[in-house]
Image: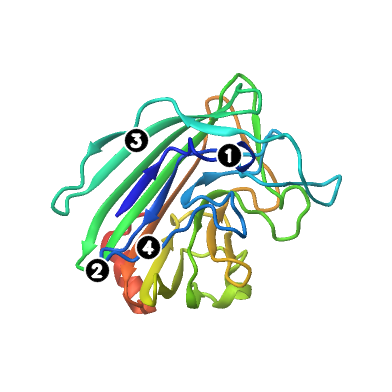
Amino acid sequence: MADYQDGSHIRAVSSPRPYLHPVRTLGGTVVTDHQPLDHVWHLGVGVALQDVDGVNFWGGRTYTREAGQYIWRPDHGSIAVTETPVEETAAVSGSPGRLRERLSWNGPDGAPVLAEDRTWTWAGVGPSVWSLSLEFALSPAGSKPVSLGSPGSNGRHEGGYGGFFWRLPECRYATVWTPAGSGEAGVHGSVTRWLAWAGKFDGGKDATLVFVAPHDATDPWFVRVDGYPGVGQSLAWDAPVIAEPGKPVRRKITVFVADGILATSDIDALINQGDPA
């Protein structure tokens, strides 16, 4: 249901990094995009940040407080796996799967800035739904704290993207909603347990994605519908988060990938069924 990309084919100014693409529903509908023309540094499903102690691990131009806008800088880093990914439990005949990997976030000079411990898990949920979970922990590569920031923490209003990010492909009749609101304006920047995206993908096939945060999560949702289709969980919405030696920054999210259009009642049932996050 998902292909693993190591990112080695990505150009340097797009901040090469591992990611998942294509991700598909059980019916085969593709629900991710990578290297789209509008933002060629958007890469499927993965983890990226634009400001890690001044290094851009997101790709493209960098937003700085001094400039008050995006500018090109030679500040792009790269993320590489330091231990070869191994499927600890293969998903066979509907059984769950698990992939744990360790990664190094390296600056433009190749020096490590962060060390990451990342785990993907996946499982079938029903005849038309499967779940994908991501857990990651970011630790300083050295003995000093590391600042994790975003355009939002550098002064861009409501531009705090970074952390988990899912770039969707072209989607017609897109609908996005949470338990508290709907539409891009109603969900962007909100803090809720879940966020759903439904629409027609891949030549007119209906599909729904449900992003589920942990009970105690305080990261706002980052949502784009009109400019481009994307959903993220903002790790540093309007202020940097500090990763300290021995105190990694940890995050988790679960995504239900479903054929067809789900109603809110369907979503509540899915979450209550296993309470994944």
Mark 3: amino acid: Arg
Left or right side of 197 for 68: right
Left or right side of 243 for 217: left
Residue 107's disc number: none
Residue drawn 76% across the image and 43% down it = 72
Answer above or below: position of 254 versus 47: below
Mark 2: amino acid: Ser
Residue holding disc 4 = 30
Query: How far apart, in angstroms, are the residues tagged by discs 3 and 2?
Result: 26 Å
Q: Earlier in the sequence, mark 3 or mark 1?
A: 1
Residue holding disc 3 = 100
Residue holding disc 1 = 11
Query: How far apart, in angstroms, are the residues tagged by discs 3 and 4?
Result: 24 Å
Residue drawn 46% across the image and 70% down it = 197
Q: Residue furthest top?
A: 143
Q: Earlier in the sequence, mark 4 or mark 2?
A: 4
Q: x%, y% of residue 7?
A: 48, 39
Query: How far apart, in angstroms, are the residues tagged by discs 2 and 1?
Result: 36 Å
Q: Earlier in the sequence, mark 1 or mark 4?
A: 1
Answer above or below: position of 10 versus 223: above
- Tell me the mark number nearer the camera, choosing from 4 and 2: 4
Label 1: few (<14), some or many (≥20) within 10 Å? few
Residue holding disc 2 = 128
For residue 131, which quarter of the picture?
bottom left
Query: How far apart, in angstroms, are the residues tagged by discs 4 and 2?
Result: 14 Å
Left or right side of 178 for 110: right
